[in-house]
Image (spheres, rainbow, N blue to C red):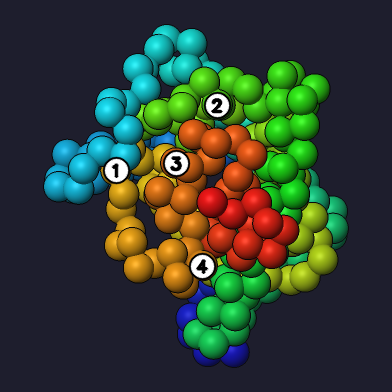
Amino acid sequence: MNFNETELSGYLAMFWQFSWPEWMAFSLVINLFLYLFSIGLYTFIDKTCRKSLLQEKNHPVTTSDFFLSLFTVICNSLVLLIGVFLWKNGWIEIGQNLSAGVICLEIIALLLLMDLCMYFFHYAAHWPMVYKMLHGKHHEHVSTNFLSLFVLHPLETIGFGVMMLILLMCYNFSVVSISIYLLINLIWGTIGHLNREFFPASFDRFLVGTTRFHNQHHLDETKNFGFYTSIWDRLFRTYK
């Protein structure tokens, strides 16, 4: 074991010793920070990107959406606490491998597996009864704004989190891989809900789930259910 792995083991040991009040505070603070980071990133790109709007104007920011977005932060905090519970009880084991090759493979695996899971979860969210109860609120944002990513029904937020936890129960992903994946997930979700095309048009041929790709889903709810890629939409013929 080299120095870096020893240091990582020490950090995990420190977190292991956290009390539940400390975990609750940590979970809320880190998720609130990520929420503000997403809003800041969206605003920065929106102000500095010179590409034209995908739709004429952004969706208006409402008080109800603001409070719902904060509740999403609370739900994400709850998912983290569930993950900690599973970790403390041996259902989830955290790997400590710091090999660059292994970490890259694990991140790719998480992106593709979560993209597949989210495709089916997202597709199911558009079944009429489920859509009316859960997902319809998100699609009030036909155009988008800096809160759109977080305007979700609580069961959707928890559902996405549970899928992630199930994957972590099936394989001992490195804590580094998990952390990088979660950061990519946040950035991708933020960029995906911009009202400006962020990626070059040529990225479509590389099966990337671009900003325009997800914007098309908000315009045509029967298409483009993927998140990071267009692989599954192309495979199951829901690509536009």
Q: Nearer the viewer, residue 111 or 131?
A: 131
Q: Nearer the viewer, residue 82 or 165?
A: 165
Q: Considering only order in the chain, which callout, 1 or 3, is on the residue closer to the N terminus?
A: 1
Relative to 99, say whether 230 is above or below: above
Query: Tag 3's secondary structure?
Result: helix
Q: Residues within 10 Å of mark 3 (few under 14, many from 20)?
A: many
Residue under pointer 1:
196
Callout 3–callout 1 Cβ contact below 8 Å: no
Q: Considering only order in the chain, which callout, 1 or 4, is on the residue closer to the N terminus?
A: 1
In this orientation, does residue 113 appear?
yes
Image quarter of residue 137: top right
Q: Position of residue 107 (x, y in %)?
A: 57, 71
Q: Which mark is residue 207?
A: 4
Q: Residues within 10 Å of mark 2 (few under 14, many from 20)?
A: some
Q: Label 2 amino acid? A: His
In 3D space, how far apart are the residues under numbered discs 4 and 1 (Cα atoms)?
19 Å
